[in-house]
Image (tube, grey):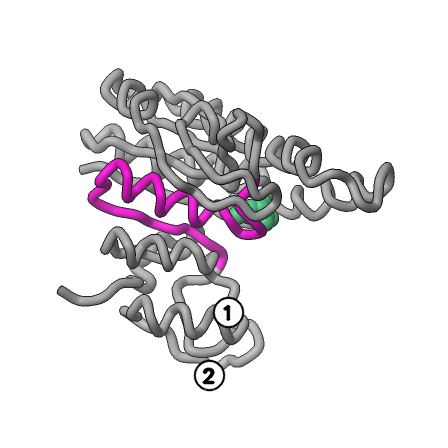
């Protein structure tokens, strides 16, 4: 089976968490699966980078902000590939542009137009776990773009769609999708399954568990997206319409 697994910033916040994710990916690969891991920047790296940028220019050009912010995910990808390597499994990290992710030219909020999957396929065929930096791509000029805050989810769904993956899993710091924010409402109810439409409604009402474009893209591809806890790995919520 071909898996695309995405890990959010909290799930990668320190070396121990990175190792935990790496162990899960390497374990799947060792069982004979092909595995693509999409990473966000570690912890609150992106917020810190935005603050730092503001110290030199409060209104830095969007193109340069993208060049700067994309580095957070690039670093996380390198670390993840090294962590998987330390477990004795070959892995390779790719930036969004190395992974063939083509976007429009809207810096700071780019839309994925296409994924040229050749490189990823070659690395998978060579027996490697492929770690892709989320949240980024290249525009028609060849410039670095970013996909908007939370955009790594969209990277994962786009890769799952263009690679025809069997599973798209979003590992996060909550154990699924709830009807209300479980951090504020202890009696919030978790969905075992939720339709694209209902998920988009929740996002519209402020839910931050998934990037809105990732759900729109999943609906276009007709692929189910599993949202589950990076800490427990227990089944969470499946986003998608039943056949
Ligand atoms: N690191 C980026 C952000 O914080 C993208 C992501 O996490 O998906 O918005
Ligand atoms: Mg982030």
**Closer to viewer: mark 2 or mark 1:** 1
Which residue is denoted by mark 1 in the rendering? 207
Residue occupying the far top of the picture = 126
Q: Position of residue 47 (x, y in %)?
A: 70, 48
Q: Nearer the viewer, residue 110 or 17?
A: 110
Disc 2 on helix, strand or loop?
Answer: loop
Residue occupying the far bottom of the picture = 187
Tell me the quadrant of the picture where the N terminus can be found: top left
Q: Is residue 139 left or right of residue 159?
A: right
Q: Is residue 99 left or right of residue 186?
A: left
Q: Nearer the viewer, residue 40 or 240?
A: 240
Residue occupying the far left of the picture = 243
Disc 1 on helix, strand or loop?
Answer: loop
Q: Residue at x 28, y 55 (%)?
A: 220
Count how many numbered circles sit on residues in the image: 2
Q: Quadrant of residue 132?
A: top left
Q: Position of residue 153 (x, y in %)?
A: 44, 49
Q: Is mark 2 within 8 Å of ligand 1?
A: no
Q: Residue at x 26, y 56 (%)?
A: 224
Q: Which segment is the magenta one?
A: 146-173
* Mark 1 Cα-neighbour bin, 10 Å: few <14, some 14–19, many ≥20: some
Q: Position of residue 190 (x, y in %)?
A: 37, 74
* Mark 2 Cα-neighbour bin, 10 Å: few <14, some 14–19, many ≥20: few
Which residue is denoted by mark 2 in the rendering? 187
């Amino acid at each position: 089976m071909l898996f695309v697994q995405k890990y959010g910033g909290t799930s990668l916040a320190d070396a121990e968490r990175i190792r935990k994710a790496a162990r899960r990916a390497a374990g799947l690969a060792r069982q004979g699966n092909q595995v693509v891991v999409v990473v966000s920047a570690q912890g609150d790296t992106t917020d810190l980078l935005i603050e730092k940028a503001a110290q030199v220019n409060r209104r830095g050009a969007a193109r340069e902000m993208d060049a700067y912010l994309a580095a957070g995910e690039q670093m996380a990808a390198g670390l993840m590939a090294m962590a998987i390597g330390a477990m004795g499994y070959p892995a390779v990290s790719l930036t969004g542009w190395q992974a063939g992710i083509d976007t429009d030219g809207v810096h700071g909020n780019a839309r994925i137009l296409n994924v040229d999957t050749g490189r990823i396929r070659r690395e998978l065929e060579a027996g490697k776990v492929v770690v892709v930096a989320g949240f980024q791509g290249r525009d028609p000029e060849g410039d670095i773009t970013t996909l908007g805050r939370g955009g790594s989810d969209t990277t994962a769904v786009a890769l799952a769609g263009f690679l025809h993956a069997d599973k798209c899993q979003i590992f996060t710091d909550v154990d699924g999708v709830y009807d209300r924010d479980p951090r504020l409402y202890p009696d919030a109810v978790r969905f075992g399954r939720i339709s694209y439409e209902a998920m988009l409604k929740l996002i519209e009402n402020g839910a931050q568990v998934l990037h809105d474009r990732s759900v729109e893209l999943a609906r276009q591809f007709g692929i189910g997206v599993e949202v589950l806890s990076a800490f427990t790995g227990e089944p969470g919520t499946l986003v998608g319409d039943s056949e």
